[in-house]
Amino acid sequence: MKRHVLKDTQEHPNRIYGLVCAKPFTQMVWNLCEMLDIPFERDIDITLKNKTETKHWPRFTFFDEDMETTYSIVKNKGVDNILAPELRNVDAFLIETNHSLTFQLSLDKVSQTSFIDFCFEVTPKMINEETDLLLYID
């Protein structure tokens, strides 16, 4: 007898790319602005508070009203902490959030930027739930 398995196909409204770049974070953001034609602006840091300390990770964002899409760049390495310890070699995350799941960025488009040494799409299985929630930018 043939068995059929129904899989949950609900997609995540975020597409996350891990970026590895030898350039400083602010220079990488400026280069991404130029190459992807996305005018990123400094936004409030992603913050995680616990009993003894508060951790911060710098963030730049842009909201495209026409496409109803938010683009963000978040630095993975803070002053004394790493946002995604399981991806400690990643310098930053490029995040595209679109609730209709019509994404504009692609791995090919991001990887064609000459200053990015390495990039890949981050899947939910690669990062822990806490990191996934911190990167969920609406």
Image (cartoon, grey):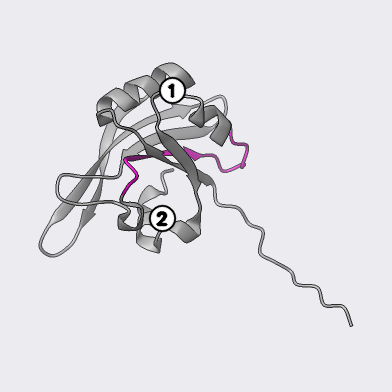
Secondary structure mostly taken by the magenta-highlighted segment of the chain = loop
75 vs 81, left or right, is: right
108 or 81: nearer the eye? 108
The boundaries of the magenta stretch are 89-103
Q: Residue furthest bottom?
A: 1
Q: Is residue 64 above or below residue 80?
A: above
Mark nearest the camera among 2 and 1 is 1
Q: Which mark is residue 132?
A: 2
122 vs 60, left or right, is: right
Identified at 29% across, 31% down, the residue is 22
Can residue 124 be seen by looking at this rendering? yes
Q: Element type at marker 2?
A: helix
Can residue 16 be seen by looking at this rendering? no
Residue 97's x, y, as percent? 50, 40
Say few, some or many: other residues with alpha carbon within 10 Å of mark 2 (under 14 / 14 to 19 / 20 or more): some
Mark closer to the chain start, 2 or 1: 1
- Residue 6 image-quadrant placement: bottom right
Residue 112 in magenta stretch: no
Q: Is residue 134 above or below residue 15?
A: below
**C-alpha gap between disc 2 and disc 1:** 28 Å
Q: Which mark is residue 114?
A: 1
Residue 121's x, y, as percent? 51, 44
Identified at 59% across, 36% down, the residue is 103
Residue 29's x, y, as percent? 33, 26
Q: Residue furthest left?
A: 52
Residue 99 in magenta stretch: yes
Kind of residue at disc 1: Ser
Identified at 24% across, 29% down, the residue is 24
Q: Residue furthest right?
A: 1
Q: Quadrant of the N terminus?
A: bottom right
Identified at 75% across, 72% down, the residue is 5
